[in-house]
Amino acid sequence: MNARLPTTQAETFVPGSDPAALIDHILERYHAVHRTQLPELIRMARRVEAVHREHPQVPAGLADVLDAMEQDLLVHMQKEEAILFPLLKAGGNPFVGQPISMMRAEHIEHGATLDRLAGLTNNATPPQGACNTWRALYAGIAQLSEDLAHHIHLENNVLFAQFEAPQVVAKSTPSHSPCCGSCGG
């Protein structure tokens, strides 16, 4: 069986556009893609864990980590879509810093989950002789990790930065520390 994941486009958004255009891009390119990626990855992870449970390199617990990640991301994206993004599209307000801070904190948690995925999957490197599903699963996890890191970078360093005082941005994303712990940016 050839497992398939949706293909994603390379990042083509040009920073410097207005916040509404960036938000629309994030919704289409990242939120919609994550909602498609995760259920398929969970399905494949459950299959790999079941079929290869005796294999010494089976990623035991991977489906559960992905399932928890999906739940966390769905709640996070819903908060952005229902509360923060409409506020930002309207130009923000003096109190926008609080929801942005909450989203930044959740982004750090998402980065920790990406680290867990990397640990469980040997950095998305399938073992020698892995079946098609296992290889597709790890390719999908690599794509999810890249997508989520870019997604978080755009929000933290491009979108949110437009609505925060310069000292807040400097304190929350220091140059020596990655924005979510996994993208290096």
Image: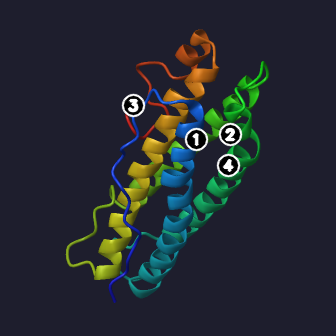
Residue at x 71% of width, y 52% of height:
78
Foreground tag (3 vs 1): 1
Q: CA distance from mark 1 to mark 2?
A: 7 Å
Mark sitting on residue 73: none
- Identify the residue under disc 4: 76
First in sequence: mark 1 vs mark 2: 1
The figure's colour scheme reads rainbow
Q: Position of residue 114 (x, y in %)?
A: 47, 50
Task: Measure the C-alpha gap from mark 3 to mark 4.
Answer: 21 Å
Separation of residues labelled 2 and 4 (CA atoms): 12 Å
Neighbourhood count class around disc 1 (C-alpha, 10 Å): few under 14, some 14–19, many 20 upward: many
Upstream in sequence: badge 2 or badge 3: 2
Residue that label 1 marks: 23
Instruction: State the SS at label 1.
Output: helix
Q: Which residue is mark 2?
A: 85
Report, in whole angstroms, how far the alpha carbon at label 2 lies from the one at label 3: 23 Å
Q: Which residue bears the numbered disc 3?
A: 185
Q: Amino acid at mark 4?
A: His
